[in-house]
Image (spheres, rainbow, N blue to C red):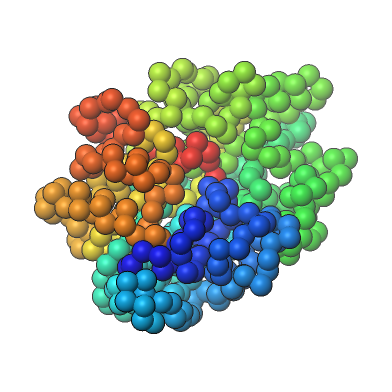
Amino acid sequence: MEKRLISVDRWSDGSQAYFLTHLHADHIQGLSSAWSRGPLFCSRQTAKLLPFKFPNFNISLIRILEVDAWHSLFLTSPSSGTKTAVQVMPIDAHHCPGSVMFLFRGDFGSLLYTGDFRWEAMSEKANKSRIILKSAINGSKLDILYLDNTYCHPSYAFPSRLCAAQQVVNIIVSHPEHDIIIAIDNLGKEELLVHISQTLDIKIWVWPERLQTLHLLGYNDRFTTNTSLTRVRAVPRYSFTVDTLEGLNKLKPTIGIMPSGQTGVLRPNGKNGNMHTSVAAARGNGFESSAVPTITYNRWKWNIRSVERLHQYIYSVPYSDHASHEELQDFLELVQPIKMRGIVSSSSCYIDPLYYFGHIQGVNGSSKMMSQKHEEVENASTFQPESLRHSSYSQRKRLRSPRIRILGSRRSRVNALRRARSGAKIVKDDRLD
Ligand SMILES: [Zn+2]
């Protein structure tokens, strides 16, 4: 695909059409209320939330794309000046409200940008998306896949969200005298909260802005901002700290629940014990220090994760809105990309999904792929939509070693590989969702 045609989750100047997969913070860096660079294409739910996220957003620039249908765009080739047609199909990403992946096709071939996604095997909704995607690809292979590689390491095995939601309920039920706080983001985990509310027939407290978002999404009856009506409160992740829990326990017995695919790897960070900005080793019931705070060392948890008690007052539950390793494998066997690139990296680390999935038939699995990596990286840096979200062009130029690339570090590739094999984890923009 030529440069200066389209951008996905990338908001710098120079494209003719901009696509937004979902409204999590790491996908909207550069987007603001003053947006005027061009039409913004997104799902209907995202379009509904966008003006709430960005007051005074020029809504005449919003283009709603219905999911599971092809849409045609006619853009101008920057090189030839001629009209070129691009077709796009949004497909539900099952990540958070409004989240979609975008499948593009045109003169350039076919390209799928997953954004963040979950791909549960037993989910009816995911099965529907599986059928839609298979039909849309129509037996041919994808030319380029940009993949949510958050949990591509094989140690990331977690249960379905429904199962994890029941684990949360079980924790709440087993603490009948406690107040409960659950860490959530500004968007996402709605179905978890609804499951708790329905199963226990209680309301859930949320902060006022979150209540507005929930109302926009159509959740009207199960949430309240009145603390006297419930003992279960969903709180912003940034406020979920050890200090907060210890302070609350001076007033009333309280436990905290952290739902995340990175369970077992959270530890408090900094003076206030903030848990959302740091991941490191945490085993047993206590916190262990880590020499490299942005890389996680999971000591071989190859089985499906379960609830862990991270601290006297804190449980982590493996409720993930990102695909597990097994789900990613299932996804790749379906779409069989000719080229593949992970979309998630941080200032410190990037793990190439090919390292774990290159063996899948059709997924560039041969050793030849090793030598193609340089070419692939170069190509990736020339496309607008495929740009890595969290690294600058200069950083991408440094992503040279064939499989694992550690940025901003003098670690050898051997050490990097060793870390990957022992659970080196990419940290997505130093936050979790
Ligand atoms: Zn997200």
Residue 306 appears in the rendering:
no
Seen at 11% across and 53% down, the residue is 368
Looking at the rendered structure, the number of numbered marks drawn on it comes to 0
Q: Residue at x 28, y 39 (%)?
A: 398
Q: Determine the image quadrant of residue 145.
A: bottom left
Quarter of the image that includes the C terminus: top right
Q: Percent x, y for residue 402?
A: 20, 43
Towards the viewer: 239 or 259: 239
Give the quarter of the image for residue 31.
bottom right
Q: Is residue 65 left or right of residue 397?
A: right
Residue 422, x across and y down, in percent: 30, 31
From what the image shows, is residue 276 above or below residue 43?
above
Residue 13 appears in the picture as rendered: yes
Q: Is residue 35 above or below residue 392?
A: below
- Picture coordinates of residue 53, whole percent (x, y): 68, 55
386 sits to left or right of 271? left
Question: Which image quadrant: the N terminus?
Answer: bottom left
Q: Is residue 429 left or right of residue 220?
A: left
Which is more toward the observer, 244 or 24?
24
Residue at 62% in and 18% down: 271
Place of residue 120 in the rendered image (x, y in percent of width and height, measured from the top left): 45, 58
Position of 87 with respect to 402 (left or right) is: right
User: Taking 152 as reference, is 300 above or below it?
Assistant: above
319 and 108: which is toward the camera? 108
Residue at image coords 37%, 71% = 78
